[in-house]
Image: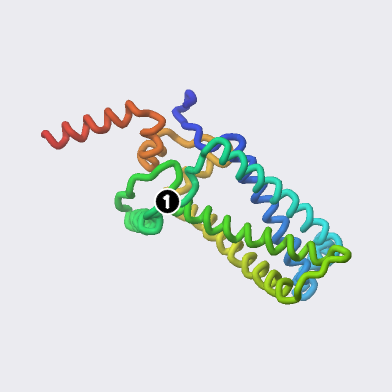
Amino acid sequence: MNREKKILRQTLSNRIVHWMTALSIFALIISGLGQLPLYKRYFVTSLPGAEWLGDYFSTLVMHYIGAIGLLFIIFYHMVLHVIKKEFDIWPKKGDLKQSFLIIKAMMTKGKEPESDKYLAEQRLAYLFIGISTMLLVITGIIKMVKNLPGMQIPYEVIFWSAQIHNFATIFLILGIVGHLAAFIFKENRALLPGMFTGYVKEEYAKHRHSLWYNKLHPKAKQECNIREIREKAN
């Protein structure tokens, strides 16, 4: 905890993973749409500075660079968290129900259930985006390998890889939109500074992520229990 009564929620490593993943996926989506090609068809290339989006080889190079960046950061993220045994973001039993209760509380201004370091809907969003990304990676590798000299891949594999790749792209875009839409709720905006500076306000963590806060500050949990006992006694 620093002097401004803030708590470190996201380490530098987590922030690097988050933003490198975001940049890589952004590059992949922009270049992938150019490979279809959509930009010429809908006259996007006629816009100032957008001519290069219609060049197949430019978007192809961009796609490969984005893919390399994404593969590297996925490997780093998985290995690091397995080594450190940090699985806070992994979905837990009852997350669907808790997500409903949290969203309901935000919409009705009611009381939210106690949450850990990550909200239930954040853990579900992580799983959804993670599965979509892994489908893109696996099918993307198949699509790349089929272009290598001497490679013979069955037509069915190529066809379904392309279909799954396209659908996974749509799901990923929807996941990203949903992820950003979460900040429509005022309660979620307090999380934004954590992805830039790493810190969130102590009061926010104490009231909205009480399970996590109590792990960091066991004494605070004891004091809270004592207050509850006194309130019941009165």
Give how far across and how far down residue 134 sits, in percent: 63, 58
Q: Position of residue 219 (x, y in %)?
A: 32, 26
Residue 178, x across and y down, in percent: 52, 60
Viewer-side residue, 80 vs 97: 80
Q: Nearer the viewer, residue 178 or 96?
A: 96
Question: In the rendered image, which quarter is residue 177 located in?
Answer: bottom right
- Which residue is at a point 80% across and 63% down the rendered structure image? 53
Which residue does the numbered mark 1 point to in the structure image?
92
Depth check: give the residue in front, 108 or 219: 219
Residue at the right extreme, as displayed: 149
Is residue 222 among the parts visible in the rendering? yes
Q: Residues within 10 Å of mark 1 (few under 14, many from 20)?
A: few
Q: Which quadrant of the structure image shows residue 140?
A: bottom right
Task: Point out the residue furthest to the left here.
Answer: 234
Q: How many marks?
A: 1
User: Which of the colour schemes (rainbow, by chain, secondary structure, one colour) is used?
Assistant: rainbow
The quadrant the C terminus occupies is top left
Instruction: State whether residue 48 appears in this view.
Output: no
Above or below, 83 relative to 109:
above
Judge whether 116 appears above or below 144 on screen.
above
Q: Residue at x 37, y 36 (%)?
A: 206
Amino acid type at image mark 1: Lys
Give the side of residue 85 with respect to residue 31, left or right. Answer: left
Q: Residue at x 85, y 63 (%)?
A: 148
Q: Is residue 18 left or right of residue 224?
A: right
Disc 1 secondary structure class = loop
Decide: is 219 above or below 111: above
In x, y percent, where is residue 194?
53, 39
